Amino acid sequence: MMMNIATALNTSPLQAEDKTLTFDYLDQLESESIHILREVAGQFERPVLLFSGGKDSIVLVHLALKAFRPGKFPFPLMHIDTGHNFTEALDFRDTMVETLGERLIVRKVADTIKEKKLTEQKGKFASRNALQTFTLLDAIEEFKFDACIGGARRDEEKARAKERIFSVRDEFGQWDPKLQRPELWNTYNGRIHKGENVRVFPISNWTELDIWNYIRRNNIELPSIYFAHNREVLEWEGQLVATSEFIKLDAADKVSVKKVRYRTVGDMTCTAAVESTASNIDDIIKEIIATKTSERGETRIDDRVSEAAMEDRKKGGYF
Amino acid sequence: MDILRFITAGSVDDGKSTLIGRLLYDSKSIMIDQLEAIEKQSKNKEDGEIDLALLTDGLRAEREQGITIDVAYKYFSTPKRKFIIADAPGHIQYTRNMVTGASNADLAIILVDARHGVVEQTRRHSIIASLLNIPHIVVAINKMDLVNNSEDVYNNIVIDYAAVAVSLGLKDIKYIPISAINGDNIVEKSANFHWYEGQSLLDILENVVVADDVNYTDARFPVQYVIRPQTEELHDYRGYAGKIISGVYTVGDAVTVQPSGLTSTISAIEIGGLQVNKATAPQSVVLHLKDNIDISRGDVIVQTENQPNVENTLEVLLCWMDNKPLVPGNKYLLQINSRVVRAVVKEIEYKLNVNSLQQEPAPEKAMLNDVIKATIKTASPIPYDSYKKLRANGGAILIDETSNVTVGACMIQ
């Protein structure tokens, strides 16, 4: 005989701490992500969590706390530092890691450029976005990582919408969309050959709004640049790009101080700000509900290159 | 607010991608920049109208060939629900993708072209939906505009499909006439179907009851990871981390660990570091037991009064998903939740014709997309329930040990 939830709970007095009756979509997403993180811990010998200082990877860390405390994380955190980061994000990263008492590995794109004599992009918004793939693959080799946990979401981009939660990459880090393993039920097959690695995306099924609602519910701290602040920005093809030592200004450039916040946090060279007065999470959520532009569309300069920009980068080993 | 996971099944020309595009568009889940991007591509196609199908075709090969080659996941939400769509391709050669998408679905939308009615592909998709035990089915009869919104055409298709449903034992079925391309009956009920008394598609999706699909009777907890901080203050802490896949656990429950058969009592339950008295599926928790017994990843903690089967011979319906054929006698790894064991496919009993549900004589080997009934022997006993009774503990995958690829999906009988 099947019981429904009400009968199941009525068989003994309901406890004050029972969350079951209020177990909603965020709890379901949280539980699924924790399950995935624990599968990584159970299946791999040398996993790593890729930490960028952005909201999605901060949520990942929060989920890892729920999955593994009071134990230590069964993996270190790793930041691939392009050298083009927002100071606020770096400071936040260091404070957070210290509070957590977990291990952080930092590998710098600048070092890879020097060692491998890589050619940097030229032009106004010369970005190291493409070059960070080299540093990531080197670090995977250096530490022999077999699984890299990342905070990518399927709602971000069309190519991501097709990627598995356990996504196998060959020894060049390449993703082959046509050779993906079927992923059934909640059973994850993380078996790989030596030299291969698996990219694991525990928050695949979360949307941008889910992330913000989860941050609000759990009072998760974020770097200050996510909230409205005054910043000197350059207006470029309808986007607002923070002025910095990494961007070449021309005489004709329109630079002004605006009240902005960041919707995503990537490199200073390829992340745009949005005009906003939202100084707290509630206001940010209101703005996101009202927005007419997608997260990546509004803030990522790097996706605009071509229709298949993300697909191509993923095939080349990018996250 | 909860989550509904659904799959859309239809053939290439049934307008499946258009339907999804329409749901996303009309529920305002499409942003301006995404729309501009597909407008640009639509113009390249020179048919003027925005091609909503382009919203779901993610990869370059798909855009170039106008096909869908893999399962894509799409998201939208309304104040009532968050929706996760698994958009599975309909071509014959990609049946494995539909099986993949269907494995987690609460509901399947089966698209029927009003001009063609119930065809072979409709049967195949329905058979897969029934094999994977999808609890709710919506038969969306599309392109009604091309048959003058005719009630007779609609009724005949409903009668035809009802026969299929009976033969498959499908239970909760709803029928709806739609025109995805015009948005008729998708979000709002359309005046074009004045004879139709049911709900709009979105209304159905928002209101189908899925809470009762969770099994709260048979408590199953596969151990994923053992938390042992081994610090001074937490010297004796030993927590079993995992997700309750079905049932309810309460502190004080008498439990058995399978397949070892060792017994103990639950001494504490933690969720996200907080102690609770009771937890239910599908929560991720940490269980503590009174006795220090040998438990490791892959073991299943169950209530002593309600046991799963624990055996090493399994009768399975198996969907083969690899290009290399399955030959009886071949050895694989079988993974059920967190447990992995060696397994050998002993014999094929019959092949299921997924277009007719007829049992055909056992072939010498099973090919990609074949569904067969087979006997599997595992190297050690595994705790399982029949898939029909408990989806969460009755589905297993086969892994090729040499390629590491997932090659088969087993529904244990």
Image: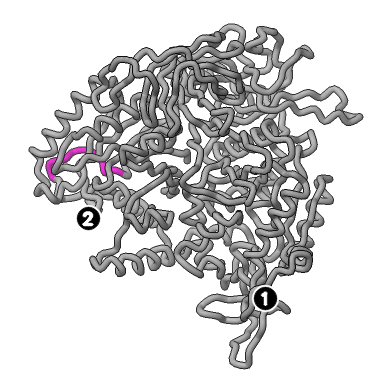
Q: Which residues are magenta?
A: B194-201
Q: Is residue B66 left or right of residue A227?
A: left
Most common SS among magenta residues: loop
Q: Quadrant of residue B168?
A: top left
**Residue B266, relative to residue A118: is it above or below?**
above
Q: CA distance from mark 2 to mark 1?
A: 46 Å
- Element type where label 1 sits in the image: strand
Seen at 66% across and 12% down, the residue is: B257
- Element type where label 2 sits in the image: loop
| Amino acid at dot 1 | Asn
**Which labelled disc corresponds to residue A230?**
1
Residue at the outermost right position: B232
**Which labelled disc corresponds to residue B182?**
2
**Whole-percent x and y of residue A105?**
79, 52
Q: Count numbered badges in the picture.
A: 2
Q: Quadrant of residue B244?
A: top right
| Amino acid at dot 2 | Asn
